[in-house]
Amino acid sequence: MGANSYEKPDYWSKKAFQEGYPARSVYKLKEMDEKFALVRKGIRALDLGAAPGSWTTYLLRKLDGTGRVTAIDLSPLAKDVKGDNLSFFQGDLYAPAIRASAAELGPYDLVVCDAAPATTGNRTVDTARSSGLVELALVYAEGLLVSGGNFVVKVFQGGGEQEILKKMRALFATARGFKPEACRAESFETYLIGLGKKGN
């Protein structure tokens, strides 16, 4: 088998390094932000599954000292990911204490989740695990987003996207799938976007 693109730095990986981001995933959020106007100064944003911190860094740079970013992950953020308006909780997204900590700093205008499960190589298992994470992120979004708030979550294709989008359409004025250019060609990840959370 030939080497796949995960084994060598690609255009996006090199660009991330040059621009001071911990990972290439930042350009997925950047593209979605440019297309859907997700991030504006003064908002409160919640970043689920944040490590190593590319999305958190993008949010902090875009907010430019305004608003607040709350980030959560099992792993720590890269050491240079910091800001006076950043709160980081290291722990399990499923833990009630972690959810309570996030809730204390909410409500939020934007919830983003680039979390991926530990993959097994078995696509059926991996997509099921991804779908579980998406459902969890949706619980956070439903409970912690303000009316009119926006939501972005990664899902592995084949992980029940249509069923999840159906739930999202009940929660948001608009819900759709979107695959950014920075996704690797062989990757089966895509993103689901909810815009304009409906009033409670």
Image (cartoon, grey):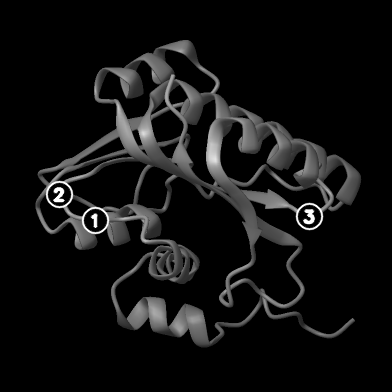
Instruction: Describe the element under mark 3 as helix, strand or loop.
Output: loop
Q: Image point 32% across, 83% down: which residue?
A: 18
- For disc 2, the neighbor class at 10 Å (few under 14, some 14 to 19, many from 20) is some
Q: Which mark is residue 157?
A: 3
Residue 134 in the image: state x and y as whole percent.
64, 37
Please report the residue visible at 33 percent of the width from the left and 19 percent of the height from the top: 103
Front one among 163 and 82: 163
Specify which label sits upstream in the sequence, 2 or 1: 1
Question: Which amino acid type is marked by label 2?
Answer: Gly
In the rendered view, tell whether residue 186 sits above or below residue 38: below
Q: Position of residue 3 (x, y in %)?
A: 77, 83
Q: Nearer the viewer, residue 44 or 47?
A: 44
Q: Secondary structure at mark 1?
A: loop
The answer to whether the residue labelled 1 contacts the one labelled 3, judged by CB atoms less than 8 Å apart, is no
Disc 1 crowd, CA 10 A, few/some/many (<14, 14-19, 20+): some
Q: Is residue 18 left or right of residue 60?
A: right
How many angstroms separate mark 3 from mark 2 (CA)? 34 Å
* Residue 158, placed above or below residue 145: below
Q: Nearer the viewer, mark 2 or mark 1?
A: 1
Q: Which mark is residue 83?
A: 2
Coordinates of residue 129 in the picture (x, y in percent): 75, 37
Q: Seen in the image, is 22 located left or right of residue 83? A: right
Picture quadrant of residue 200 = top left
Q: Which mark is residue 40?
A: 1
Q: In the image, which disc is placed on residue 87? A: none
Q: Amino acid at mark 3?
A: Gln
Disc on the earlier residue, 1 or 3: 1
Element type where label 2 sits in the image: loop
- Residue 143 locus on image (x, y percent): 45, 20
